[in-house]
Amino acid sequence: MNRATATQSLSVSFTVGLYGTAFGAASIAAGFSILQTCLLSLLTFSGASQFAIVGVMGAGGSAISGIATASLLGIRNGLYGLRMAPLLKVRGVKRVIAAQVTIDESTGVAIGQEDLGINAMKQGFWLTGFGVYIFWNFFTLLGALGAQAMGNPSAWGLDAAVPAAFLGLVWPRLTGRYERTLAASAVTLAIVLSPIISAGLPIIATALLAVAFGWKVRS
């Protein structure tokens, strides 16, 4: 086992896992039960998609809107799978497990070990994937229990956890003029559409806007 890879995997896993506390609190604030909150983390295991579901439904949107929004955000995991499949070469049950832990962090750490060889890449993927899964679910439970113990989560401002979490995800990626223009356009579109259409649909509209931006850049 490569020690540097293991250290990096643990560092990433714990840091990302801590973020599960915010999801647990946000989910309770949106009206989900502790069981529902934990099941979302155990089964969905995609931070952005989970925040989208509780955000849309907590704002009064339908389950269909929430699922559609979460699905759009989760498409990238399928693309990661295409990248990881030739490397992992897994079959049967192991393939299902690999699909569950194919996320931003496991893929990123795996690719980051490319100079160290295939074995280090595989190690980075599995250690990070399982590490994030364990820590994310553990801290989701802690966040949910803490939010419920507070009584009315909204009174503590926890209902702002979802937009704050998304801002935290997006902000580090706004490094160029293109990204900033897209972000500003998406915010404007969402604000304009929010009073007009059902909750959740403005987010879907901004996803379509992102596709339009990408298409224009490629053409």
Image (cartoon, rainbow, N blue to C red):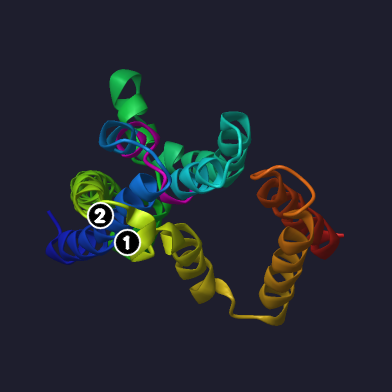
Q: Which of 35 and 11 is in front in this view?
A: 35
Q: Is residue 165 left or right of residue 218?
A: left
Magenta region, residue range: 40-48
Q: In this view, does 97 lie to the left or right of 127?
A: right
- Return the residue at label 1: 113
Residue 143 in the image, given as x and y percentages of width and height: 24, 53
Instruction: Estimate the spatial distance between the alpha carbons at disc 1 and disc 2, rounded to whole Å.
Output: 6 Å
Q: Nearer the viewer, residue 79 or 142?
A: 142
Residue 180 in the image, given as x and y percentages of width and height: 68, 77
Q: Check if mark 1's residue and mark 2's residue have beta carbons within 8 Å.
A: yes
Crowding at dot 1, Cα within 10 Å, few <14 / some 14-19 / many 20+, comes out as many
The reply to whether residue 83 is visible in this rendering is no
Residue drawn at (16%, 65%) of the image: 7
Quarter occupied by residue 69: top right
Q: Nearer the viewer, residue 179 or 215?
A: 179
Residue 33 in the image, given as x and y percentages of width and height: 31, 35
Residue drawn at (44%, 44%) of the image: 50
Residue drawn at (33%, 64%) of the image: 156
